[in-house]
Image (cartoon, rainbow, N blue to C red):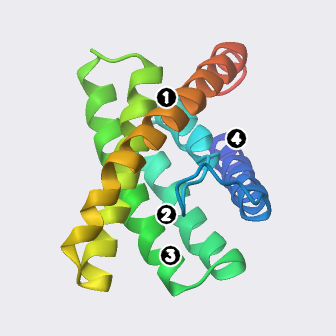
């Protein structure tokens, strides 16, 4: 149990480092607000190493801590919407056993953007903002693929050491 708690702490620290790095990178995909989603590597790994409960706990703590350290109330709101929706979808897909880790990550990237655009529609009280979603869909698919490939490689190389 102590080892698991210590490793979850390490995963939380890694997720915060990824959040910090991402906040420093002036990354522009041609779509405002789009990010790489580096912290999703940690979430996907937690989902496969430990399960939904642990992934949810670390993800929730990371969103709050990163929001207070590197963001604001709106960043917490958008991150919670995207993070919780994507984790819910990824957990469901993983549980079926029909999807590869990379496909799970792609769906997570897409649904993260969906959660954020839905919150944006409510916050700005403008439903036309949903017209932005096709661009976010493509971006979520691409970043989800890249994150899934990285997570799969890390998982393959470390699954014998972590549990």
Of the two numbered discs 2 and 4 on the same chain, state the one appearing first in sequence: 4
Q: CA distance from mark 1 to mark 3?
A: 25 Å
Label 2, label 3: how far apart the Cα atoms are: 10 Å
Q: Are marks 4 and 3 in contact (CB under 8 Å)?
A: no
Q: Residue 97, percent across and down? A: 29, 17
Task: Tell me which label, 1 or 4, sits earlier in the chain.
Answer: 4
- Image position, residue 128 (x, y; %): 23, 69
Q: Eyeballing the image, is 34 above or below 74?
A: above
Q: CA distance from mark 4 to mark 3?
A: 29 Å
**Label 1 close to label 2 by CB (< 8 Å):** no
Looking at this rendering, what residue extends furthest in the left direction?
A: 127
* Image quarter in which the N terminus is found: top right
For the residues labelled 1 and 4, say whether their Cβ atoms are less than 8 Å apart. Answer: no
Q: Secondary structure at mark 2?
A: helix
Q: Give neighbour class at mark 2: few <14, some 14-19, many 20+ (Cα, 10 Å).
A: some
Residue 139 x, y percent position in the rendering: 48, 42
> Looking at the image, is mark 1 or mark 3 earlier in the sequence?
1
> Is there CB contact under 8 Å for labels 2 and 3?
no
Read off the residue under disc 4.
3
Residue that label 2 marks: 60
Q: Which residue is under mark 3? A: 76
In this view, the mark in front (1 or 3)? 3
Decide if residue 162 is on the left or right side of residue 74: right
Give the CA distance from mark 1 to mark 2.
17 Å
Residue at 49% from the left image edge and 63% from the top image edge: 60
């Amino acid at each position: 149990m102590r080892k698991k708690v210590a490793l979850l702490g390490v995963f939380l620290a890694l997720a915060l480092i990824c959040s910090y790095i991402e906040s420093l990178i002036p990354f522009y995909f041609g779509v405002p607000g789009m990010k790489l989603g580096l912290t999703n590597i940690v979430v996907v790994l937690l989902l496969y190493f430990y399960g939904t409960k642990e992934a949810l706990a670390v993800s929730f703590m990371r969103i709050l801590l990163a929001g207070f350290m590197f963001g604001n109330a709106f960043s917490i709101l958008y991150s919670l919407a995207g993070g919780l929706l994507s984790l819910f979808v990824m957990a469901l897909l993983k549980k079926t056993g029909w999807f590869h880790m990379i496909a799970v990550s792609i769906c997570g990237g897409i649904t993260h953007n969906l959660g954020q655009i839905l919150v944006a529609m409510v916050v700005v009280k403008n439903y036309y903002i949903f017209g932005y979603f096709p661009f976010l869909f493509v971006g979520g698919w691409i970043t989800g693929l890249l994150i899934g490939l990285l997570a799969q490689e890390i998982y393959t190389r470390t699954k014998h050491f972590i549990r």
